[in-house]
Image (spheres, helix red, strand yellow):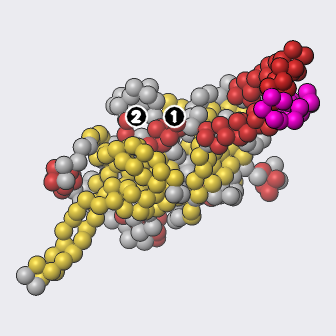
Amino acid sequence: MISEKYIIFGIIFGILSYVVTNPATYKRINGILSRIGYTRISQLGFIFIILMIVTFATFVTESNDTITFKMYNNITGKSILIENVPSIISNGKLIDGKPTVYQSYELKTGLYGLDSGSHLLTDIVLVDDKKVVEIFKKNKLKGKTVSYGYGEGGKQVYKTDSDIKIDNKLLKNVPTNMITLNYLYTHTCKTPIEYTKYGSCDLFSLEKESLNGLMGLSYVLPNTPLHEFSLISTLLERHNKTLYLNMKQDKLTLGLKNLPFVPTFEGNISVQKEGEHAGLTSWKVKAQYKDKIHEVFIDTGSNKSIFEKDGEFVLTNVPKESSGKMYITSTKVNKKVEMHMPYMLAMNDLKDSEIYADYNTMKVYLKQDLSKYNI
């Protein structure tokens, strides 16, 4: 599909070429050039100059339409480095000769996990809600709060609009959020082995060892409660409402108007239509295995795929919902986890993939290297 922009530039090029090569116009322009001391230009020369101008304008507008960020590896998948994120930091000092710990509002630099199951940029703060409110008041911060949590912990976020940097690119007046960890499961995991043993306990405490929080990749529809809290929604609306992940090249690009690869699978992006979280989109797609239709979540925030049992599976399309094939290598975690989790295509099956989400058409496209699976 040809972008509307290129069609418009093509029309402009045609019109200008016709105008300057019209005998009367051509003679008038060369007359002006002669009077100011410039050499006459041939009709072909005029066409070449116009072509260069239009090509340059196309390149400049394409560059302005897109923005690319470098991705880094972490224990659950990929992350990005963000500067000037508002946070609450613990500090220490001697008071009357005794070491004393206190918390203060600071701007910090951190790694944030890229999570297609999330919608907000959330910085994990290790204090309770009461302390956050206290520090907001003390620093006269203008912020808002909303109920939003993850299966791994947290239930409330606190928003401030900030100027942050990603890859030294300044993003002005965008929403950032703090999330507290005072709403936790009964067991706190200290190692990945304990997570395997206990299931959905406080995974955030485990992720905190390598991440400062999460960067949600899923769009929030306008005029819904969580839209103003969503960084990715703000950026998508500035950049054509498309998102492209290249896992091999470690690049996240917003704004590409055309699908940059031939997909092996594509499906409809789902939308939550009712309740307090109405307007949240999700990369939950429909696929089938042995004539049974399943909902599968394409999850960049988890490291292990989950299906109905251990093993390797090829899922195929569901008419009117999806097309192509996807490959899942399933590792069951335990019954406690599976009761609360959908089937997932996670980073063990996405590490060499490409993903393109188009929130204009509400489609998500996936490219897996199926040749290595003999498909």
Identity, as a three-letter code, of the amino acid under mark 1? Glu
* Residue 128 sits in quarter: bottom left
Please give the name of the residue rendered at 34% of the width and 44% of the height, measured from the top-left corner: 161
Q: Tell me where residue 106 appears, x and y as whole percent.
A: 29, 61
Q: Nearer the viewer, residue 110 or 3?
A: 3
The answer to whether residue 9 is visible is: yes
Check residue 127 in the rendering and tell me which mark sits there, or answer none: none
Dot 1 lies on which element?
helix
Label 1–label 2 contact, CB within 8 A: no
Task: Identify the mark at residue 237; answer none if there is no mark.
Answer: 1
Pair 1/2: label in front? 1
Q: Which residue is mark 2?
A: 227
Query: Above or below — where is 362 with respect to 305?
Result: above
In front here: 289 or 278?
A: 278
User: For the point 51% across and 45% down, which residue is it?
Assistant: 217
Q: Which range of residues does the magenta coloring cover? A: 34-51
